[in-house]
Image: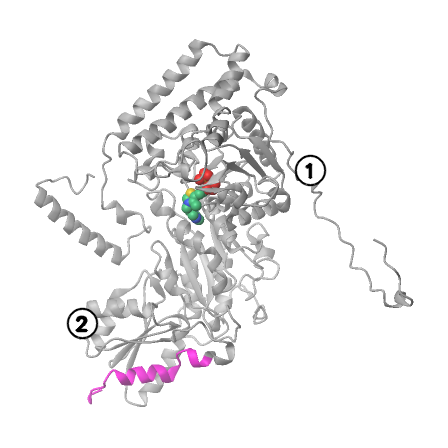
Amino acid sequence: MTTAAATAGERTAKARPATMAQALGRALRDSMAEDPSVHVLGEDVGTLGGVFRITDGLAKEFGEDRCTDTPLAEAGILGAAVGMAMYGLRPVVEMQFDAFAYPAFEQLISHVAKMRNRTGGAMPLPITVRVPYGGGIGGVEHHSDSSEAYYMATPGLHVVTPATVDDAYGLLRASIASDDPVVFLEPKRLYWSKADWSPQAPAAVEPIGRAVVRRSGRSATLITYGPSLPVCMEAAQAAVEEGWDLEVVDLRSLVPFDDETVAASVRRTGRAVVVHESSGFGGPGGEIAARITERCFHHLEAPVLRVAGFDIPYPPPMQERHHLPGVDRVLDAVARLQWEADH
Amino acid sequence: MTVQELPGAAAYRPTPPPAWKPLTDPAPLLPDPEPYRVLGTDAAAAADPELLLRLYAELVRGRRYNTQATALTKQGRLAVYPSSTGQEACEIAAALVLEERDWLFPSYRDTLAAVARGLDPVEALTLLRGDRHTGYDPREHRIAPLCTPLATQLPHAVGLAHAARLKGDDVVALAMVGDGGTSEGDFHEALNFAAVWKAPVVFLVQNNGFAISVPLAKQTAAPSLAHKAVGYGMPGRLVDGNDAAAVHQVLSEAVERARSGGGPTLVEAITYRMDAHTNADDATRYRGDSEVEAWRAHDPVQLMERELTGRGLLGDDAIEEAREAAERMAAGLRERMNADPVLDPMDLFAHVYAEQTTQLREQAARLRVELDAENEQHGTDDGGAGR
Ligand SMILES: Cc1ncc(C[n+]2csc(CCOP(=O)(O)OP(=O)(O)O)c2C)c(N)n1
């Protein structure tokens, strides 16, 4: 499924990126311009500019040695990136789609995540692995997986996922600048969305590892990230009519995990729902719910609930809307938090 | 085959496909049918005697290193040792063909190559002793960590060599892999990348006959592992892996080719693992004595010794001298390996990320408490260090 690509979008140097796709492209461009050791490699990233056009124009501007079309081999791409990083480059690898990153897992888990540790700190690997992930774009099989739990379960990796245009820019810049490997998950259904819940600050480099409160409220906290942020914002808006004042926390970084922001919010509200579209069983929500329970047990007025995708392989596109947690499912969960009269 | 033309067929004759021609001429990429040999042939006379003597001394030391490391497993000083006894010619040649600026990418069996390249033998053994994953700084020695997941170090070698070339450095990477490792997907991806990128890499396959217990015939149906090269568009070379002079020469040519921009080479060295897979393996379950004996007659150390003595380049004194040097190395290794390594458990958390996460800080504090309690109980106060 490579047809869903964005049109290149005008690349005026100074204009603020309008879409997440543009912001990501800008982040790559700015990083490459500032630091000659930044190299982009992957399938179709050169002439084509990537199937999502995120790398559009980079090969032209920086040459094919800096933005390289590789053979079609994910382990080879990431494995070569390891060697490049060993020699002092900062490779940014594009995995074409979530489910096509799996051939590279051996490299990711055995080498990318562990090299710093294996070498007693002597050999850090500053590699950014960009993975378009998640559903909602009508992709056929193998184009809509949410693989964040696999990455989260691997010590040594940072796992980052933006939900806004500004964060797409800021977090990608920070990821490329990081001396640690970062799995940068791009919610592909937000690539072209212009909706933005970030403050109207100019695009800035955002340090990795800080969650942000996107909407403050008193009744309960929705904890979410990436593609589910818009769902939660919408749910919070809809809940107002029913007298619920929901806080929405956007994690932005799954590893490291910002326990402080999350716990502070849940202590304020006393109730929490974790929302994500990846499957619930063994998914990120379980870890997050456990952390909240451990830290906020005495503040909780209800069990921490999870709203997640079903525990099924990602469904065919004509069925995906049943799988993806939408506003109603979030509101149902909120209702199950047993609202007291004073809310 | 002649095709009988049906009446009127000409009217339906399809247009032929657009002209096709191969990207490269496959003929020069094919290996010679016989493994290349130097020792015992005319080529030996042309070889530099000093190089042969150097190779000999290193072979003797290498053999002694292998027997010493194996002995250390019996004393419980090494958790495991995958011996390269019988394969020393490959290990030594791989180390000696490289310039200082070049990089070696060893597999888990290639401790000896790392030591022959100059790495401190104790630092080279930390992985197998179990105190550290990698006891040395790979950048300082230009030796990648000994790699346990098979063939996964090969794409690293390609990436590093590629990066070096992009930076304008004439650095070559030599990557070692076993015959079993050539079946892994990473082997394929690495060779393909290297050939497409014309990366300055040399792949050295030590075909020692077995992957643990599985013989080559169950690993591949290719004519030889060197033949695989042609499918990637790089030359494949077959060499007698017990003939240190031959391995050195073939690898030198491959390194030279890589350095001068000629791209990668796949070298298959035919050798034999004399010991079991590791000290923990029972080789009698999968191979017979007669096979092992046949290879004993083709011992790499003996081959070189016979060549040099036969040509009057090596006398009894020199042989004795080489053995004594090897003994000194072994004694030093024994002594140093008998000392318990000093470990700081806090190091467990030190090198996961550049900056410790809150979560790791909390876990480190937890361990600190446990260690303090332990120390109090045992009345020690060594700050948690010690075995
Ligand atoms: C990816 C992977 N699979 C399995 C193993 C377990 N294993 C360790 S050594 C070995 C055999 C390797 O044989 P070969 O590549 O011929 O190298 P040799 O042991 O002969 O040096 C196996 C299967 C491993 N280390 N890595």
Q: Which residue is mark 2?
A: A297
User: Which chain letter matches label 2?
Assistant: A
- Is residue A236 at least partly visible in the picture? no
Q: Residue at x 33, y 23 (%)?
A: B330
Q: Residue at x 33, y 42 (%)?
A: B133
Residue B185 locus on image (x, y percent)? 51, 51
Q: Residue at x 41, y 59 (%)?
A: A183
Residue nearest the observer in this picture, B34 or B352: B34
Q: Which residues are magenta?
A: A321-343
Residue B347 locus on image (x, y percent)? 26, 45
> Mark 2: which amino acid?
Phe
- Whether residue B82 sits left or right of residue A188 in the image: it is left
Label 1: element kind: helix
Residue A123 locus on image (x, y percent)? 38, 44
Q: In the image, which is nearer the foreground, mark 1 or mark 2?
A: 1
- What numbered label is drawn on residue B28? 1
User: Which chain letter matches label 1?
Assistant: B
Q: Is residue A120 above or below residue B60?
A: below
